[in-house]
Amino acid sequence: MTISIWRYSHLALAVSSFVFILLASVTGIILAFQPISEQMQPYHVSDLGQVSLAETVAVFKKNYSEIIEINIDANGFVSASVFTEDGENLEGYFNPETAQYLGEKIKPSPFFQWVTNFHRSLFLKSTGRFLVGLFSFFLCLIALSGLVLVIKRQRGLKQFFSKVVNENFIQYWHVVLGRWSLIPIIIISLTGVYLSLEKFDVLPQEANGHHVNFETLKASPVKPISVFNSTQLSEVKSLEFPFSDDVEDYFILKLKNRELAISQFTGEILSEIPQSNFQLLSRLSLNLHTGKGSILWSLILAIAGVNIIYFVYSGFAMTLKRRKSRLKNKFKKNDCEYIILVGSENGSTFSYAQVLYEGLLKANKKVFISELNDFGDYPNAKHLIVMTATYGQGEAPTNANKFLDIVKDMKPSGVNYSVVGFGSLAYPDFCQFAFDADESMNSRFSQFLKPFTINDKSIESFQKWVNKWSKKAEIPLSLALEELQTKPKQTKKATILSKTDVHNQPDDTFLLTLKSKRYQRFQSGDLLAVYPKNDYRERLYSIGKVKGHMQLSIKFYENGLGSNYLYNGEAGDILKGKIISNTHFHLPKKRSQVMMIANGTGVGPFLGMIDENKKHDIQLYLGLRTQDSYELYKSQVEGYLQDRKLCGFQLALSREHHKQYVQDLLLNDAEKVAKLLLSGGTIMLCGSLAMQNGVINVLETICSDYAQKPLSYFQKEQQLKMDCY
């Protein structure tokens, strides 16, 4: 399968280093708990930023006859080496405010020492150290290539943390966890590389020792050491005391940004060594890599380690899935009449193509299946079937990125073709590449069927397309759809609040209102997916958000799977479903003028948009059969007109009075429609495909006669939104 350079790099790096990554992650998770266990020890004192070094030195001198040194570690614990009046040497932790001895210094457990040595070098000494640094660098490259893939998937850096569509559990969490773990993983890998370079003396060494002019040293006048007074313990790393009372012996004070040699008599700074950037980076790298001094960061490191293990698993799982979808053919391409061309980024589209391929073989047809980038001459081809997903911002999948150019170089022929697009309505560029492929092929081949789109891998939609194609091709097909069947995932409960009586409606239509605390982020225009038999059979219904609840307008069919499931529920009953974000059909935020056109139950999402309207100038054109059909929506529409949420309303009745359709109303208001489009307004269509076709024809005429621009111009400006069925 063709793989992009970024995906190939991501995979190649992971394959070449996954053993190390697993070992480093497991040991890293264990070691993340070492600083946590240290922080839990009872040696923590009050804020070191409130205690001066002078105060600590004074209290230590008062309580002990001799002080060797005082240290402050990354945990903020104060340790010291002192001698008591009895000549006893005390080493351990002390209270810096009282000089009280608190206990012996923490000794790393043999277990943590063993894990640390293994983590650092795999017990291979210098060779292991080198490998650790190398694979840490690989881990950084894996993270960066993953970053590029996520940015491409999310359609830009600005959308990096936007919602990820859950099309596959493993892939979904690979992306979501990858986004949140990206920064910690890059920090872990870069600091690992830095520490390895430091171990091999690749980085500049620390500055030389202090240069003190002993001939100029003075023992008087004796003064308090002012630098001790101005230095807080939070700034101190260590303080070494003079070995004797000789003037040649002095204090060595190591701060976080410099090191000082200080006269024990005059308090004069005899020498100063500024800390280099490399020393600062070394300390920072060590603390960031190990989590020393911070329970929170240690936990983040542990979680990142767990996520890395998951990435190894999920990455290989996705790779194996793609490999399973590798194409095998029974016949040679030059002998086949039916050619299936597949475009897929993650491999899921191949499973549908494979089922169709096997169905055609059962029908005794010679069929060849290939990737879109391998499209070429097929001497005996009669039918080309393109089955493709869309990637990124309406772009081609990686294995189809050359297809449009290939088609341009093809000679026109009478070969029939059909395009099937796979995608998710949660993305604004739903199946865009499928439409691009159809437009390109239309100039070279004969369109057998119009482009057909399949949302969220719907098996029902796929079956509908297969039925249409097989009927027109006069080829009876029996497909093994059970191979595609999966149970619905991530469904949530909703409570029925109310339901109208379908028997009082001449059009067998009813309104259903649902409430659920779990559905908080939906908008009017989104879709509710229900699974009446708790299997792969999915039914989608447009949602209107009315008074914060879901309102659906549903056509009842006596043998309808979805409509029966929804109508048979009573107030208080629980239904299960899931929201599918339909962003391309939301009320436009930046366009104040909106013309809504609907027929039948297509008015459902519009009622929700109008209910929430606060600033838009909305005109509604509604097509129904009879005046009685309008009774179902009358109270809502009149209420919206009265509240000025709806600025204009026209009703077309196809079976009474003048027997009009909505397109007739639009033609009567042709100048008004053209003016709205020219002023930047939006037209929204929802209802049947027959209505959509009629309205589109009228709009094309209006745009040509009154706007002097084709309808396609306004479509490119995203002034036409359609959600028809």
Image (tube, rainbow, N blue to C red):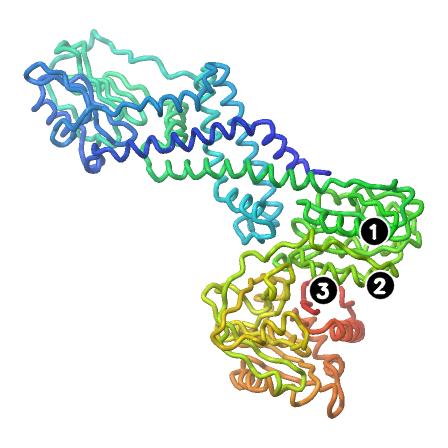
User: Does dot 1 land on a helix, a strand or a loop?
Assistant: helix
CA neighbours of label 2 inside 10 A, class few (<14), some (14 to 19), many (20+) = few
Residue designated by label 1: 362
Tell me the distance, in whole angstroms, between the alpha carbons under discs 1 and 3: 42 Å
Image check: 667 left or right of 251?
right
| Nearer the camera: disc 3 or disc 2 | 2
* Three-letter residue code for mark 1: Lys
- Which of 300/616 is in front? 300
Please tell me in which quadrant of the rendered image residue 419 appears: bottom right
> Which residue bears the numbered disc 3?
715
Q: Is residue 54 left or right of residue 624?
A: left
Cα gap from disc 3 to disc 2, whole angstroms? 32 Å
Element class at badge 3: helix
Seen from the viewer's position, the closer of residues 217 and 316 is 316
Label whose residue precedes the other's in the sequence (1 or 3): 1
What's the residue type where badge 3 is placed?
Gln
Q: Amino acid at mark 2?
A: Lys
Residue 661 drawn at (x, y percent) = 74, 82
**Given the current orientation, which residue lies at the most extreme top position?**
215
